[in-house]
Image: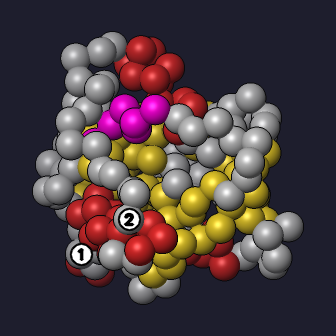
Amino acid sequence: IVTNAHVVNQARKQLVVENTKGEQFMAEAIHVDNQRDLAILKIKDNTFKKLPAIPYSIRRTNADLGEQVFMLGYPKAEIVYGEGYVSAKNGSGMDTIYCQLNTAANEGSSGSPVVNKKGELIGIITSAERNAQGVVYAIKSINIYRAVEEAKKKEANSGIKITSGSGLRGLDREQQIRKMEDYVFMVKGD
């Protein structure tokens, strides 16, 4: 599970993730990059049934200006869908770690995957501009890809696999959402 480091750092003791069915599982951070605000979690709960391969791929190039995107996340107790577009290739002050989106985001949207119509992960939401409505920042997918590759270097994480092709390509939006929902978790801390 990829999320933001600031989400993980707010957890005092134990990390818990919750799926769309309301089932909760214990998790641990296996990689934290505070500079890029990224964290990778691993579910460490015997009651969790392993999921098939992730249906979307991680884009290894920057998103295009104007590219249509959608998000799934947990700004409240149930999964929420949102859509928007890439409004700037870089974040505030030309920060190259992030891209800027035009979309709605609420507190709790951090870590939400941002996916294009081809089913490629182009980033995860990290923050919203407080003084401008609809301005949201997402960590670019190339940083996510690098973080996953870094996490894989540890022997305990050598089984991590990155999906090379998207199983969402060519599907309509509702089908894409149905295939993705099981792979989006709410991250909580005890």
Residue name at image x 24 percent, y 63 percent? 142
Between 121 and 135, which is closer to the camera in this rendering?
121
Label 2: element kind: loop
Residue 18 versus residue 156 in the image, above or below: above
**Disc 2 vs disc 1: Cβ atoms closer than 8 Å?**
no
Q: Quadrant of the C terminus?
A: bottom right
Q: Which residue is mark 2?
A: 158
Label 1: element kind: loop
User: Label 2: how many residues lie within 10 Å, few (<14), some (14-19) or many (20+)?
Assistant: few
> Given this view, does label 2 or label 1 mark the residue nearer the observer?
2
Q: Is residue 85 left or right of residue 14?
A: left
**Residue 75 seen in the figure:** no
Residue 39 versus residue 95 in the image, above or below: above
**Residue 185 seen in the figure:** yes
Q: Which residue is mark 1?
A: 96
Image coordinates of residue 150 in percent, x first then y, are: 33, 75
Q: Which residues are magenta?
A: 52-57
**Residue lying at the far bottom of the rendered structure:** 35
Residue name at image x 73 percent, y 52 percent? 45
Q: How is the rendered protein coloured?
A: secondary structure
Question: On residue 153, which mark appears?
Answer: none
Image coordinates of residue 159 in percent, x first then y, are: 40, 57
